[in-house]
Image: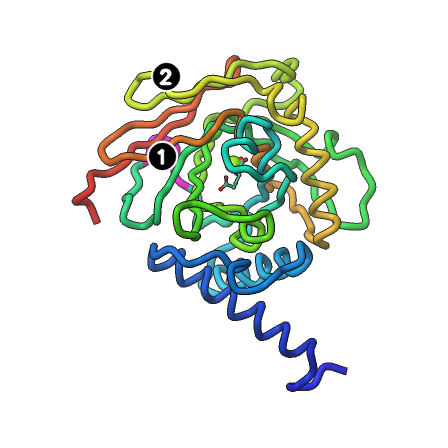
């Protein structure tokens, strides 16, 4: 039984306060110490905190718009020193229009990474065992803005999962029907800042083939009991290391054969 004084109730209170801490850090753009610096967390507990954290966004009127994977590429995992694939949630409040502009003041220490996005054409519930690829209707070039709420952008696996995998913003380029997209196994991926190449990679870096990320995301959503709705965006994970955003720059990702997605970063003096 869960009473106000039971260990279960105490844990629930601890998880809720961890979610509150991370939510306030995101809203105020003020970093916080890693959760694991004040006590051990299991991965299950970290995902519970992530759900509570997203719950706070939903309570403010945001809606779930997608899911994301992190550390699906080795170069990206090596950059952060975390090598397990992680699952996070995207909301409509994180969406940045293609060609839009962001204000740096909203973030703690944002970075950007080039990604591939998939879109689901049908719902996938936790109990459905349909082929995940058959549920994908389109693919697009994308950018993810990640912004760890932890000081110095440093974390353990449990910390980054609790912090919703640093999810902060995403930009989608034009959708191509999956049936018309051709083989996605080894497409060039380029990240440009102010027209200069900052990073290059290949879609092959994403679990060997970006469609494997669809399988992984569906598997992880199932474990989380998370229903994936038709229209859900699925970010497959960065194909290259992430790059810190600087004021007054333009950022663009190109995936060969799929086109580009971009945004600009406001000046330091912008609101
Ligand atoms: C965690 C998120 C990683 C990716 O694409 O690999 C991620 C982080 O690096 O802060 O989104
Ligand atoms: Mg990412």
Residue 9, image x, y percentages: 65, 78
Numbered label attached to residue 197: 2
Colour convention of the picture: rainbow
- Work out whether mark 1 precedes mark 2 in sequence or the reverse, and give the earlier one: 2
Q: Secondary structure at mark 2?
A: strand
Q: Which residues are magenta?
A: 96-100
Most prominent secondary structure in the magenta stretch?
loop
Residue 163, image x, y percentages: 52, 53
In the image, the residue with mark 2 has its CB under 8 Å from the nearest atom of ligand 1? no
The residue that disc 1 covers is 244
Q: CA distance from mark 1 to mark 2?
A: 14 Å
Q: Which image quadrant for residue 110?
A: top left
For label 1, the crowd category at 10 Å Cα-Cα, with few meaning under 14, some 14 to 19 and many 20 or more, is: few
Left or right: residue 227 compared with residue 128: left
Q: Residue furthest left?
A: 269
Left or right: residue 246 compared with residue 236: left
Residue 50, image x, y percentages: 57, 57
Q: Is residue 169 magenta?
A: no
Position above or below: 37 against 127: below
Residue 206, image x, y percentages: 61, 26
Q: Which image quadrant for residue 269?
A: top left
Image point 58% across, 50% down: which residue? Answer: 161
Marks 2 and 1: in contact by CB < 8 Å?
no
Of residues 171 and 149, which is closer to you in this image?
149
Image point 46% across, 46% down: which residue? Answer: 154
Image point 46% across, 27% down: which residue? Answer: 173
């Amino acid at each position: 039984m869960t009473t106000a004084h039971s260990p279960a109730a105490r844990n629930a209170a601890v998880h809720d306060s961890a979610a509150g801490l991370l939510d306030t850090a995101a809203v105020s753009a003020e970093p916080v110490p890693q959760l694991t610096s004040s006590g051990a967390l299991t991965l299950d507990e970290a995902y519970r905190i992530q759900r509570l954290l997203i719950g706070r966004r939903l309570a403010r009127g945001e809606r779930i718009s997608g899911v994301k994977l992190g550390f699906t590429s080795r170069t990206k995992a090596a950059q952060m020193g975390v090598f397990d694939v992680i699952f996070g949630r995207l909301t409509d409040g994180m969406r940045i229009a293609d060609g839009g502009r962001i204000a740096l003041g909203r973030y703690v220490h944002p970075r950007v990474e080039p990604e591939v996005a998939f879109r689901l054409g049908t719902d996938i519930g936790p109990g459905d065992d349909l082929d995940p690829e058959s549920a994908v209707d389109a693919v697009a070039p994308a950018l993810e803005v990640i912004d760890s709420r932890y000081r110095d952008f440093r974390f353990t696996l449990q910390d980054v999962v609790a912090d919703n995998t640093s999810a902060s913003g995403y930009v989608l380029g034009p959708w191509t029907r999956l049936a018309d997209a051709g083989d996605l196994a080894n497409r060039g991926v380029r990240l440009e800042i102010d027209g200069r190449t900052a990073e290059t990679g290949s879609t092959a870096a994403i679990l060997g083939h970006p469609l494997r990320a669809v399988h992984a995301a569906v598997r992880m959503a199932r474990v989380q009991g998370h229903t994936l709705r038709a229209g859900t965006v699925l970010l497959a994970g960065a194909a290259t290391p992430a790059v810190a955003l600087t004021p007054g720059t333009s950022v663009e990702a190109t995936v060969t054969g799929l086109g580009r997605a971009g945004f600009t970063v406001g000046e330091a003096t912008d609101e």
